[in-house]
Amino acid sequence: MIETFETIYNFLIKFLPFSFGFAFIGFIVLFLLKIFENDKVKKIGIILLVQFFFLGIIIIVMQTTILRKIRNEILEILSDPQTQIITSRNDFKILPQELKKELLKMQNIPTNHTHPEDQKSVEIISSKGIFKIFIARDSKNKNQFWIFTDKYEFSKESEIGKVNSAIINNR
């Protein structure tokens, strides 16, 4: 299901530059209508402008939906008692089971003009497959960690959530 949404999103995002071009043409048409009064051309200009905003809203809703579905799936996988986390002792000072408990606290926390830094990876072994979760410390809040995963293409670039934790301490 997530793969289907990713495919649709990738398809729609390719149309965004063309949509912007059509919206610009619509703006010019509406601007020129002050000189030439024509109701049919006015409707075309309005449609060209509205389609850009409509496509933008669809893309934003799809992006939010995809990230929510990925986060929920990862939380479901992590809540399974059979799921194992493999970490490097050099990366984290806490035990894998404690890290798993902290990752289960993942939420959608808005970004405050910060960025992730010092990214470390952990391997997840579950009945749904083997994948990695990347944990990166927030640039300003040292107790906040950004969570990424390579399970889906979309979540490699966009964080699926954040965790506030005082015990996660990546070196």
Image: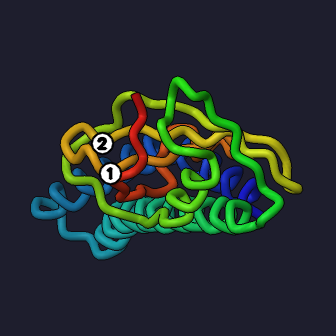
Q: Which residue is mark 2?
A: 138
152 displayed left or right of 43: right
* Amino acid type indicated by mark 2: Asp
143 displayed left or right of 132: left
Image location of residue 94, percent across then percent down = 51, 43
Label 2 vs 1, first from the N-terminus: 2
| Image: 89 above or below 43 | above
Image location of residue 95, percent across then percent down = 58, 45
Image location of residue 124, percent across then percent down = 72, 45
54 or 103: nearer the eye?
Answer: 103
Helix, strand or loop at disc 1? strand
Tag 2 and tag 1, C-beta contact below 8 Å? yes
Helix, strand or loop at disc 2? strand
| Image: 148 above or below 77 | above
Q: Which residue is mark 1?
A: 144
Name, please, the residue furthest toward the right: 127
Mark 1 neighbour density, 10 Å: few (under 14) some (14–19) many (20 or more):
many
Mark 2 neighbour density, 10 Å: few (under 14) some (14–19) many (20 or more):
many
33 displayed left or right of 38: left
The part of the image, by quadrant, that contains residue 122 is top right
| Image: 161 above or below 21 | below
159 or 33: nearer the eye?
Answer: 159
96 or 37: nearer the eye?
Answer: 96
Question: Residue drawn 50% across and 35% down?
Answer: 92
